[in-house]
Amino acid sequence: MADAFTLAFDAPLGGLNTLRIGATASCLATIADPDALPAILGHDQLHELPVLVLGEGSNVLFATDFHGLVLRPAWRSVRISDDDGRTAIVQAAAGYGWDALVDWTLAQGLPGLENLALIPGLVGAAPIQNIGAYGVEASEFITAVDAWDRGRGGFVRLDAVACGFGYRDSIFKREPERWIVSNVEFRFDRERRRALDYAGVREELAALGNTDPTPAQVASAVRRLRHRKLPDPGSIGNAGSFFKNPVLARERAAELQSANPSLPVYPAGDASSKLSAAWLIEACGWRGLRDGDAGISAQHALVLVNHGRATGAELLTLARRVAAFVAERFGVRLEPEPRI
């Protein structure tokens, strides 16, 4: 067990979050085996500290230093646990890279995740956020999640219903202090129909000359779209889309679209519609604006960027200003995607 984890006190986090916020944590635990969790959480110096699980740091904003214990899952494995020739069950460890999982499943002839290509982060974050893109959500494939339940003091398995999935939401996100995801189980159907109807996907495939695309070709098109639309965290600090697309009652969304004909509106259930948060922000004139080193990306109005030395507090202040402006003009409340 001695090699199962390492501890670092007063640990810098600037290189562990894609917004490049120079925060510190009271302690950073890098974990190679989830069975080490009881020892870490029961450690004399750590057991009373608040806990934050940090994967690739692509969905978090440190507004201040974190006076607690940061856990980094570093256990990585993926395998097919059952396969009847038509459907397959895949077990993926929380520390396995998400985009690596997309490529691995496609290489096994298991379609489905191609629309979720190039989303940053680890597999363990997928059920927490119920990640989604281009008309597909992770919850469409997740059948169970294994997690350490801090309330019970043991590992539990939650089926998809118990996970409480919603739009960019889950029980893990609603109770972040309780759950530490260790493994995610997925179910894939080899005959799954391609999801090509989201705006831009068919057009990108047509530009590539793919009229009857394979799942791998869809993944390639999605990666091209994301590279073109979203700034690279390797070039400028960002956490991807900062605000959720707001979901409103269908009647209210129709009223807004009637007053603003170019506003994109998408179905979101029987009685709800989803609006484009990027359109709302851009319509308010915020795209590309900058306040010191805190700014809104010129590539995509939904992305907050750190031009160099912005603090988490400065980025949070900017995000709140944007949300307040949108609320005043359109009467629509924007909610952040990252954990703050």
Image (cartoon, helix red, strand yellow):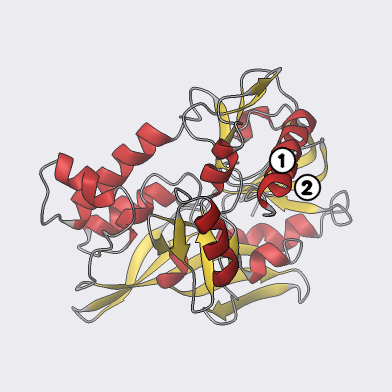
In the image, is 267 to the left or to the right of 37?
left
The answer to whether one can see residue 40 in this image is yes
Residue under label 2: 69
Disc 1: which residue: 325
Residue at point 51% right, 78% down? 160
The amino acid type, in three-letter code, at marker 2 is: Leu
Q: Are marks 1 and 2 in contact (CB under 8 Å)?
A: no
The residue carrying pointer 2 sits among few (fewer than 14), some (14 to 19) or many (20 or more) residues within 10 Å by Cα, namely many
Q: Nearer the viewer, residue 312 or 249?
A: 249
Q: Position of residue 94 (x, y in %)?
A: 52, 57
Q: Nearer the viewer, mark 1 or mark 2?
A: 1
Say the numbered circle drawn on residue 190.
Answer: none
Residue 172 against residue 164 in the figure, above or below? above
The x, y position of residue 289, in whole percent, is 61, 24
Left or right? Give the position of 94 relative to 155.
left
Image location of residue 283, percent across then percent down:
56, 38
Q: Secondary structure at mark 2?
A: strand
Q: Quadrant of residue 323?
A: top right
